[in-house]
Amino acid sequence: MFTERIWKRVEPIWSSYLEHSFVKGLGDGTLSNEKFQHWLKQDYVYLIEYAKLMAIGSAKSRDLSTMSTFANLLHGTLFMEMDLHRKFAASYGISSDELEATDSAATNTAYTSYMLNHAQRGGAEHVVACLLACAWSYNFIGKSLAEKGGLSQSNPYHAWVETYSGEEFTDLTNDAIRLMDELTEGKPEAELAELEEIIVKTSYYEYMFWDMCENLETWNIPQE
Ligand SMILES: Cc1ncc(CN)c(N)n1
């Protein structure tokens, strides 16, 4: 199975996320609220672009079952995952409109542009390759933080850990993994290598996104 090969390739990269101070702070509750709010706003506009991947995937699907999986992932992103962001924002007095008006930071823009470029140029299998690390690595982090006590009510970010380790998000992740395997069945090595490259690059972008939030980065140029 293609995703077994992928797991071996990305596991060291994803394990490095668990050592990142932003991720550690999410799990033990020591992350500053300023940094979390930076993630919240940047991630909201990230997810708007990310959701477009699934719409593209639906349009590129060759059968109704694949189309339904993309549509379900799209629905889960807009109405389950982004609800987490809206709830956190509301608790900080930030409206959904304010979240939506966030100016996407440099790393965020590079990441979403990379995915949308590959999704538009390729087939449905390229679209799943683009979104796989995103879904799967968050589920991996959520489960790991949950095991380490991140679900404790004393953790101000326990709802984050709950969402990404929870059944609904796990089911959506497993749908994406299953789809990746279905769409790569019987594909030649050259095509698999191309898809693997996308998954590795998006895994690097995931690390850079954590770093961007840790360092409160936007567009790091001297003030105009
Ligand atoms: C940057 C990023 N990567 C992944 C996820 C999980 N969908 C997310 N919300 N944001």
Image: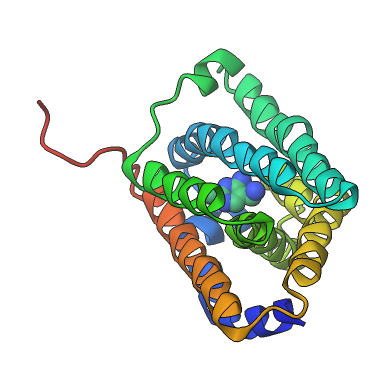
Residue 143 seen by the camera: yes
The relative height of residue 48 versus residue 209 in the rendered view (above or below) is: above
- Above or below: residue 148 compared with residue 217: below
Residues 148 and 5: in front is: 5
* Residue plotted at (74% across, 38% down): 74
Residue 95 image position (x, y, % from top left) = 58, 14
- Given residues 17 and 137, the one toward you in this image is 137
Q: Please say if 215 is above or below 34.
A: below
Question: Quick check: 25 left or right of 184?
Answer: left
- Percent of width and height locating residue 28: 61, 57
Q: Residue 5: image x %, image y %?
A: 67, 85
Residue at left offset 60%, top offset 85%? 189
Q: For the point 63% across and 54% down, which residue is it?
A: 127
Residue 10 visible in the displayed image: no
Image point (61%, 37%), residue name: 52
Please identify the quadrant where the C terminus is shown.
top left
The x and y percentages for residue 102 are 44, 25
Is residue 149 or residue 122 the one in the foreground? 122
Q: Is residue 209 left or right of residue 166?
A: left
- How many numbered discs? 0
Say how the picture is coloured: rainbow
Look at the image and tell me in which quarter the N terminus lies.
Answer: bottom right
